[in-house]
Amino acid sequence: MSPLRVSVLAYPGCFASEVFGVPDLLTMAAHVAAAQGAVEPSYEVFVVSPRRRVVASGGSRIDVSAVRPADVLIVPGFEVPPALDLDAALAKLEPETATIRAQAASGTAVVSICVGAFLVAEAGLLHGREATTSWVYADRFARRYADVRVRREKLVVTDRGVTTTAAFSAMYDFALRFIREHDGPRVARSTARIALLDDARSTQAPYVDMDLLPTVGRGFSLSVMRWLDQNLAARYDLPALARVFGVSTRTMLRRFGDETGQTPLAYLHSARVRRAGHLLETTDRTVASIAADVGYRDSGTFTRIFVRYTGRQPSVYRAALHRPHDTAASPRRKPRHPG
């Protein structure tokens, strides 16, 4: 079989690590496959650009070759400083969006990493499709591309030949799935172990920090979120919640949904899971005790919801992320008396 042709699209301001992250993991997978008996190389990787020179974020210069036919085109993300004029930035990348559009038209599968989804959407490839991106920019993405069904909790979404991923490290989640499809689960598993990667992640929900999300235009939903956070263990009652904020249930769902892309109940579940995850990481309390603390009287229901949002059983989550207190720390020195 001929090796799979993989092109990575480099462009001004892109993250250099996202240009080379997937190719490096594919190189590791090729070595693993060879060690397990593969005769032919699995991948042929090129870094391409419609430009002659590319300077990535941080001033890193990237050697590029001309755009060529490929089986897969990977579009990395780009630097998004707080003051970035997104309209102007995307307009300057029109040669890249044209390249993405032309490659897709020729039958190439397109993959975006993180906010590379903005470029793929600008190219018109996400119209009517499901997609994901970094949770930090998911609201902004959803407002800009109202015709895209944004799955903000997902790490990797593939819809009719177009794949989008969440932030930065999700490129490895995609790469491992890619390796699994083309080299088999054994090679993917071994590659993940060698690279110290988690090959069982399925959602970015546990990483969401509401304090880091932009607040512009989200005053109503932020107030509702704050109230839900303060009443985490209370039984969910939509009519009662609506009365607290002086609106009808219909208005509550509409305004909260317009600002966040989800329902208050979905937010409550994610907030409970975040709190439970913190307790699993930092305490030795039982799962049943933690479930009750965050509002689930039935530990089975809690476990199902926790798995839905994190992709892991609570016990597995704790085993991977538990941070025990450092009991071996040096005792504090007694303060010295003056003189």
Image (tube, helix red, strand yellow):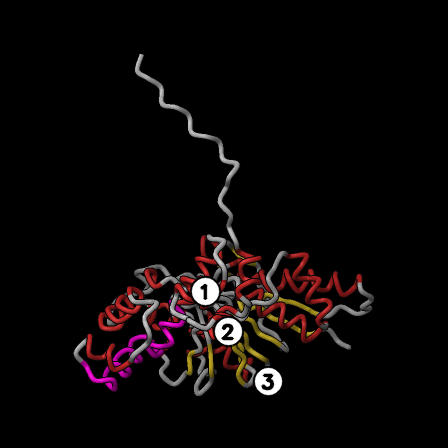
The residue tagged with tag 1: helix, strand or loop?
helix
Which label's residue is closer to the chain start, 1 or 2? 1
Which label's residue is closer to the chain start, 3 or 1? 3
- Taking the spot 63% from the left edge, 60% from the top edge, the residue there is 24
Q: Position of residue 81 (x, y in %)?
A: 35, 59
Confirm or deny contact between disc 3 and disc 1 (CB under 8 A). Answer: no
Q: Which residue is mark 2?
A: 300
Mark number displayed over residue 92:
none
- Residue 165 visible? The answer is no
Q: CA distance from mark 3 to mark 1?
A: 35 Å
User: In the rendered structure, which segment of residues is drawn in magenta?
Assistant: 247-271
Q: Position of residue 314 (x, y in %)?
A: 52, 65
Q: Nearer the viewer, mark 1 or mark 2?
A: 2
The residue tagged with tag 2: helix, strand or loop?
helix
Between residues 233 and 2, which one lies in front from this camera angle? 233
* Mark 2 neighbour class, 10 Å CA radius: few under 14, some 14 to 19, many 20 or more: few
Q: Nearer the viewer, mark 3 or mark 1?
A: 1
Furthest residue toward top: 339
Q: Amino acid at mark 2?
A: Gly
Name above or below for residue 165 compared with residue 160.
above
Q: Which residue is mark 1?
A: 206
Q: Quadrant of the N terminus?
A: bottom right
Q: CA distance from mark 1 to mark 2?
A: 19 Å
Name above or below for residue 140 compared with residue 17.
below
* Mark 1 neighbour class, 10 Å CA radius: few under 14, some 14 to 19, many 20 or more: some
* Mark 3 neighbour class, 10 Å CA radius: few under 14, some 14 to 19, many 20 or more: few
**Main secondary structure along the magenta-highlighted residues:** helix
Between residues 330 and 218, which one lies in front from this camera angle? 330
Q: CA distance from mark 3 to mark 2?
A: 45 Å
Q: Nearer the viewer, mark 3 or mark 2?
A: 2
Mark number displayed over residue 107:
3
Q: Amino acid at mark 1?
A: Pro
